[in-house]
Amino acid sequence: MKETLLGDRDTILRAEDITVVKNKKTILKEVSLDIKKGECLGLVGPNGSGKSTLLKTISLLEKPTSGRLYWEGQLLPAKIPMPLRHKIAIVFQEPLLLNKNVFQNVALGLKFRRLPKKEIKARVEYWLEAFGISHLAKQHAHSLSGGEAQRTSLARAFALNPQILFLDEPFSALDAPTIEELLVDLKKVFESTGVTTLVVSHNFRDINRLTHRMLVMLDGRIKASGTKEEILSQQHDQETQSFLTQLVQN
């Protein structure tokens, strides 16, 4: 990582002109964005707009067809160093829990990183408590409700102490009361940790509760950015305006 951007100290991750083509179909079209240190950034758009592909690309799970990614101002090489991957945590729509109990699932990533047993125990217990699932520590993951499973997945991610956290539609499989409870607890965690976060969602209301600013994605492009108020006050093309009007009404 030799090339450095000047005047970029507040940005942890920058994407420049990211294009992704799959099966001759262009999914992302020259997308550029900055994620600032300590901010919670929202990415909202309809299904099929490219949100999940963008998340997978900037979280280093998939390589773009073209474009460049920078980490703290430094151009990322084609082969991403493992220490950098360890600075990133991801929570998907489906919790992806293993055939183990809750404590073991939360401890999984820490064991892979060969942390001392005492530290693993302390971290797991802390995050079980933070997400209100300490009483479920010995419960098998497959017996959890949807909300309990997602809390376990979030505790596992935060236990890694990531520099940047990616959440891909974390509420879409949950009912309204469960979402409300999780939003309250997650906001408290964001405020207490200050972890840099990108939240992907199709729900404008929920994402606005958590984020400092938002990006609106349609048809593989970023069409608007800013706070909710700024985005709604901006002039947009007909497609973007129609989407935003529908979001606000839902």
Image: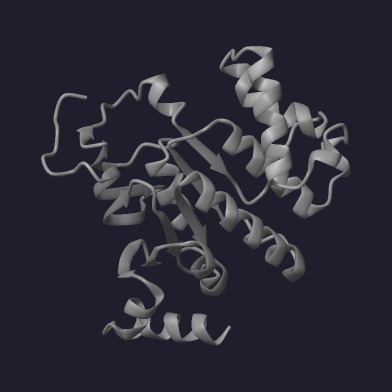
User: Which residue sits at x=26%, y=26%?
Assistant: 77
- Residue 34 appears left or right of 163: left
Is the residue 144 above or below the residue 202 in the image?
above
Instruction: Tell me the residue at 29%/27% (across/down).
Output: 78
Q: Residue at x 36, y 50 (%)?
A: 24
Colour setting? one colour
Q: Quadrant of the C terminus?
A: bottom right
- Count every numbered label the image shows and give the total: 0
Residue 16 in the image, given as x and y percentages of width and height: 22, 48
Which quarter of the rendering shows the N terminus? top left
Percent coordinates x, y for residue 169 in the rendering? 58, 57
Q: Is residue 204 above or below residue 102?
A: below
**Quarter location, residue 130:** top right
Query: In terms of depth relative to the viewer, which is nearer, 97 or 228?
Result: 228
Q: Is residue 50 visible?
A: no
Can residue 126 be seen at all in this image of the molecule?
yes
Residue 58, image x, y percentages: 38, 43
Taking 129 as reference, is 17 left or right? left
Q: Is residue 145 or residue 107 the one in the foreground?
A: 107
Farthest residue in the left direction?
A: 6
Q: Residue at x 46, y 68 (%)?
A: 45
Residue in the foreground of this view, choosing between 190 and 239: 190
- Residue 103 percent coordinates (x, y): 77, 30
In the figure, is residue 156 to the left or right of 204?
A: right
Foreground residue, 42 or 220?
42
